[in-house]
Amino acid sequence: MTKEEVWELLEPIKDKIDDIYLNSDNEVVISFKPHNLAPISIYIFRDLDCELATVVCTDEREKDDTFKIKYVYSYHKKNIFFVLQIEVKERFISLSNNIPALNWYEREIHDMFGLVPLNHPDLRPLMKYPENFPQDEYPLRKDYPWNKRPKFMKYGEYEYKKVEGEGVFNILVGPIHAGIIEPGHFRFHLAGEPILQLEIRHFWKHRGIEKLAEGKTPEEVLQYTDKISGDHSFAHTLAYIQAIEKLSNTEIPERAKYLRVIFAELERIMCNLNDFAWLFQDVGYTFGAQGVFVLKEDIMRLNKALSGSRFNKGVLALGGVNIDLDNEKIAMLKHKLNEIEKKYKEYEKILHNNASILERLETTGRIKYETVKDLSAVGYTARASGLSSDIRKEHPYLVYDRLRFESIVLQEGDVYARLRVRLSDLENSIWIIRQCLANLPDGEIKTDLGEIKKNSWTLGYAEGQRGDIIHYVQTDDEGNIFRWKVRDPSFHNWQTIQFAVLGDIIADFPLVNKSLNLSYAGNDL
Amino acid sequence: MENLTIGLIQFFILVAISPLIKGFIHKVKCYLRGQKCASIWQGYRDIYKLLKKEIVLSSDASWISKVAPYIVLISTLITASFLPVFNSHTLLSFTGDIIAFVYVLALGTFFLALYGMDQGSAFGGLGSSREMTIAALAEPALMMVIFTFALQTGTTNISEIFAKIHQAGFSQFPISSVFALMALLIIALAENGRMPVDNPETHLELTMVHEAMILEASGRDLALFEISSWIKLTLFLTLASNIFVPFGLYNETTFVSVILGIVFFLIKIFLFAIPIALVEISMAKLRFFRVPDLMTFGFVLALISLVVYYL
């Protein structure tokens, strides 16, 4: 990527831009005068058709007495991330009205840093609960100690949205649910069975992971990465490690790259089988559900045999991988994959041929293209509704640019479409693993990490099963973590559920919810 | 005296085996899914456990919540005492006919729905409204099935209907019964909260019908609701098995024939429980707004059976 190519893309707003520079191969930082933020952002988001990747706020008051907010947009047609940075003292312009995907980010910054987005359409607290947290304390500011415990008492009231009218009633679900799932609060406004509006409230168990990492060495942070979101422990760790390797200019051995891809795809297969089984379960087709749960268990046991961990925890290391696959393990992997694929095909056949199941899945939980586009949804949620989203293709990492695989995009946007995208992903994952095994080079699996650049930042990313995972890592004067911002796919996709249920009846909500299968923990760091 | 004894035996057998039927259906499903499963006797253990536990009642609950479990149980028990199980001598069949059978059961459903709404929880009201929708749709179909048999036998007394059918045996098995059997299967699935109308195994409150109404119940109340629903399922299975397999020494009262009758009945009822498990395992749950279509289908089948009888 050269500067000239980037300038070409930015031609129409050239006069608003002061300068651009490359932070790394694909991170283009645009500098501009503060009042030009809105037109540049809107041009990049709307005209260039970029997706919002993440928004990072950092407290750099010690250095120059300002907070910095970086808006990161991902350009799909070329491997570019646009980064717009503004300096903020107390207030900044809200762009949520034009770019709805920014809504939660701006509320997050308001909660965590105490910066006020002007003209924000809905500035209720997002993750800082007035019920038990003081509203005038800002946990992610540098002068807030990580171990401070505010007094547990009521500091205020949260205002829920209201829907009124004859025959309108509310059903409140959660935050404690019947199944073994995480906490989330769902407020349905109904007129009979049809849903008029759904309001969600999450962030019940904020763990402060980002704060915990500050001041720690990059190795120390590894202990948190696999705990961000349980079933995506590998993908999150991969995203983080790639950021650190970029910061330290480490080129890992070829064999390690292939092994990383194999384990990443095993995780994807496991998650996709899990979702497939749960969708069977939630339409009440327990026969299929049990069968597919067995396949998922097979994959987890395979993981255990390959790496010693059912979730492949501890496989990744800075500079490579800890686990090598010998010939015996490769043979077992090949054999098991064939077996699982054969059985999986049977259940896929049942799915496509059972009218009573299809009847439940089709047209349920439809999300429009406009919704996923506006909210920058990612993963199967986006791809089922016509928006392509697969960071393996857009910003290839490891060896994905050398592998052949498909990332299908469907238009229907319903539960069935999301399931079909998953099933296609599953088959492609098997295909990818076979390609990797066929081309697996010999050699080292680990190299020493170079020296980590001080006072610099970069993005690490990986495609999880739910969508792209983006980690922003910034180092301080000593090469320790200054700011670590994790963006789980669920942070974008949770907002789509409020639109997915419109036009459905309440009895179908669990199915819609499962078809999105979002992470509560990844969303709530 | 002899007749009274037989009536009591029938009544007790019906009530006593109902947890077993529930356990059996569950066992068949687990077997087909390749799962390990709770013992077939689990129903008895559940009831025993629940009866020992205390009742937790919402402070918003009115007297309805206190009496509803008993009314539901009693109405189910009264219908159980109407129904001949393996012999024509029942406890109460002189007091009511097959129409009373349907409507005494409906009284239980009515109080169950009231119970769902009484404690003011969101899910209870949802369950009650759904249950009433389904019950209102299932009722005409059930009545239609009953009319078919009442017309065939010229009486509405259940004992007599069964007696005449058993007398005729298989020799005069009318084709109309095939349609009536299909209609009765659909109605039984709907009335008892089974798949594809309701999923008795789900933990998702928002999709529940029967379970949603009793979500707030605990301890003894829950035990009464559970046993009532199991007895109700057994009632439908008994009804179907006696009408469609008129086999067994129904009209005799000797000791040996009673014993043989019990054996035949047990074989029949377990055989009739298997299709319920098979339907549950092979179908997804219907969308709630598709349930009326299914009920209409049941009604039409019942109507056809009535028309075919006259042809």
Image (cartoon, coloured by chain):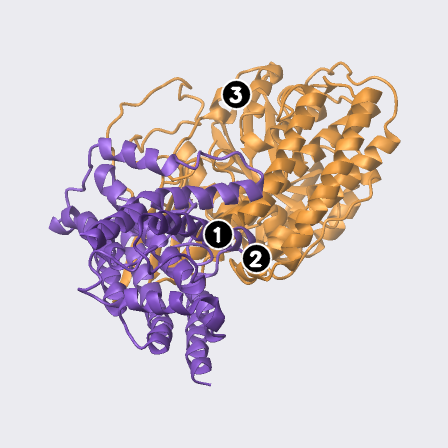
Chain colours: A orange, B purple
Please tell me if label 3 and label 1 are on a single chain: no
Q: Residue B102's spot in the image, x, y percent? A: 27, 65
> Which label was assigned to residue B271?
1
Three-letter code, disc 3:
Ala
A515 or B230, nearer to the observer: B230
Q: Locate residue A137: give its quadrant.
A: top left
- Residue that label 3 marks: A213
Please tell me if label 2 and label 1 are on a single chain: no
Q: Chain of mark 1?
A: B
Q: Residues within 10 Å of mark 2 (few under 14, many from 20)?
A: many
Q: Locate residue A195: give its quadrant.
A: bottom left
Q: Secondary structure at mark 1?
A: helix
Three-letter code, disc 2:
Ile
Q: Residues within 10 Å of mark 1 (few under 14, many from 20)?
A: few
Q: Tell me the distance, in whole angstroms, between the alpha carbons under discs 3 and 2.
A: 46 Å
B275 or A381, nearer to the observer: B275
Q: Secondary structure at mark 3?
A: helix
Q: Residue B96's spot in the image, x, y percent? A: 20, 66
- The answer to whether residue A346 shows anywhere in this view is yes
Q: Chain of mark 3?
A: A
